[in-house]
Image: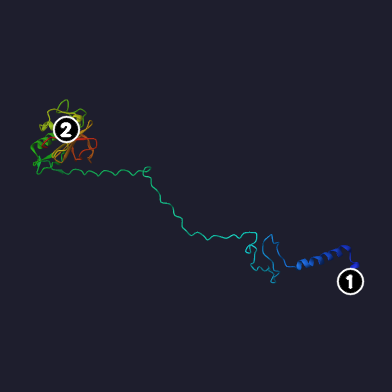
Amino acid sequence: MDWKMVVRRLPAALLLSLLALVAAAPTASADHRHDGDGGGYVDDGSYDTDGGGYYDDGSSEYDNGGSVPVTTTAPADTTVEQDAPYADDDTLDPEPAPAPAPVPVLPTVPVTKTVPGTVAKLRTDGKAAIPRGAPKRVQALIAAANQIVGKPYKWGGGHAKLFDKGYDCSGAVSFALIGAGLLGAPMVSGTLAKWQVAGGGRWLSIHANKGHVYLEVAGLRLDTSPVGDPTRRDGVRWRPVIGRRAGFHTRHLLGL
């Protein structure tokens, strides 16, 4: 076949298309490589004939010192984070003060005038059984107090007159002391706080300040206040001993 004749007969547009294909063929057959400044995989020309595309041999400019730095992943930190210990600020949340030990209810004995020993006992009627081993003045004081035990509280009671319908704290203490021959006339609590000798006695102790007074004798307490008494009953009563309360002065008589 005379190819020259064929070429002459082809239209000019088709001829130009054929020339363009011939010129592009060498470029397609050359090795495919990325621009060295652009990075990426290097194509060695091998092609997966199974239809999977170009075969990657694993080489990369990222691994061969290319312009794009290699990013490495740090190993996972397996350290378990723990919370810092909680600092409890006692100034913000103070602990409550411990409750005072409960005072047991006084045991009672049947109504009797005296009991053996040196300790007075609370009778079932609220009065005190007098200990036969106590000094005579102590026995007399308990007997006198028994006369007003159960009387209600009355402010100023026992001061204007010795025998009254009710008694306040100093009136009740004064009545017992007068009945034992230890005091000549009623005194207010502030005066009793300075009376006789400082400190507690073996048998009798008077605890007083300007606002209140009570006495403890032979194991019982004569008081109009229910402080330290589980019964919480008001008025003149025998109650459990509690010793000297804060803010009180303790006095006693010599020999007692």
- Badge 1 marks a residue whose secondary structure is helix
How far across and how far down the image is residue 216, in percent?
16, 38
Eye-nearest disc, 1 or 2: 1
Is residue 127 something one can see in this rendering? no
- Badge 2 marks a residue whose secondary structure is helix
In the image, residue 21 sits, relative to residue 85, either above or below, namely: below
Which amino acid, mark 2? Val
Q: What is the crowding at mark 1: few (fewer than 14 residues within 10 Å), some, or many (at least 20)?
A: few
Picture quadrant where residue 59 is located: bottom right
Is residue 175 something one can see in this rendering? yes
* Dots 1, 2 in contact, CB < 8 A: no
Q: What is the crowding at mark 2: few (fewer than 14 residues within 10 Å), some, or many (at least 20)?
A: many
Residue closest to the far top:
160
How far across and how far down the image is residue 48, in percent?
69, 70
**Residue that carries the numbered disc 1 in the rendered image:** 3
In this view of the protein, which residue sits in the foreground, 249 or 132?
A: 249
In this view of the protein, which residue sits in the foreground, 59 or 139?
A: 59
Picture quadrant where residue 68 is located: bottom right
Name the disc covering residue 173, or none.
2
How far across and how far down the image is residue 139, in percent?
10, 37
Residue closest to the far bottom:
1
Real-space CA distance between mark 1 and mark 2, rounded to the nearest whole angstrom:
151 Å
How far across and how far down the image is residue 18, in percent?
84, 66
Picture quadrant where residue 94 is located: top left
Name the disc covering residue 249, or none.
none
Q: Is residue 43 left or right of residue 22?
A: left
Which amino acid, mark 1? Trp
Q: Is residue 35 left or right of residue 164?
A: right
Q: Earlier in the sequence, mark 1 or mark 2?
A: 1
In this view of the protein, which residue sits in the foreground, 114 or 207?
A: 207
